[in-house]
Image: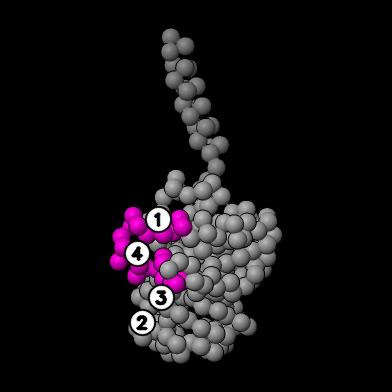
Amino acid sequence: MANETTEPAKRATKRAAGKSRRRPVKSSASGAKAPARRPAGPSTLCIDIGGTGLKMMVLDGAGKPVNERDRVDTPHPATPRAVLGALGQQIQRQPKFDRVSVGFPGVVVDGVTLNAPNLDPSFGGFHLAKALEKLAGKPTRVCNDADVQGLAVVSGRGVELVITLGTGMGSGLYLDGRLVPNLELAHHVFRRRKTYEENVSDRTLHRIGKKKWRKRVREVIDHLAPVFNYSMLYVGGGNSRILRQEDLPRNVKIVSNDAGILGGFHLWR
């Protein structure tokens, strides 16, 4: 009879002891979880200016996204005034940032855009870095968009080449991770007196269809290989999604179009 009454008591005592050993859950005064801390270091507003879209996102001190990508259509005509007006509205929606990186579809030297084949001719000789510094109130760096994209994907070993397939065609060249800026392969004559860009542009894609366009891209790749003798070629841009990895050589890799934004973090290294 004594055993029947003591065993339940022992089990109750063990349950009480187990509860007392549980660690309390930390919470704020309101009961909500404390927000996660961002990595130390400046946050970067990364902007990708394209012929069809303007995209931006804030990256933290480790180069990781803080918010969702913000995208609007590129205004037409895409004059500096119109593009800056659209960017200004987007910037107002972004989280706090400390600096700005910009990928631009044209040749850029010391923050000045020398041309913009898929935007408005008035971008020729425009000091975009200075204009965006005034607009955002933060230090700003501007670089060719394909060059920026490559900074996010190259391994840093040997000769590496990047091409981007979107409204037009961009290109970037790297030696042991160091950028050779403003390589404009797109406007070099490729076949039938037409340039690389004319052969694989978005307009050509819609005119000839995906199957023929993929063949054109492969011809471009086969033509570039013996010229640059790269260890790896990276293919990005919005239309790279139409390609199939299994159709490409082993040293050619399709990369996400998000690299056009993520590379902005590396522009400050």
- Of labels 3 and 4, earlier in sequence is 3
* Span colored in magenta: 193-219
As measured in the structure, the alpha-carbon distance from the residue carrying label 3 to the one carrying label 1 is 24 Å
- For label 3, the residue is 51
On-image quarter of the C terminus: bottom right
- Of labels 4 and 1, earlier in sequence is 4
Is residue 202 magenta-colored? yes
Determine the secondary structure under disc 1: helix
- For label 2, the residue is 75
Q: Residue furthest front?
A: 192
Residue at 55%, 60% in the rendered image: 224
- For label 4, the residue is 205
**Is any part of residue 134 visible from this angle?**
no
Residue 69, horizontal then vertical, whole percent: 43, 66
In the picture, the disc for residue 215 is 1
Given residues 238 and 244, the one toward you in this image is 244
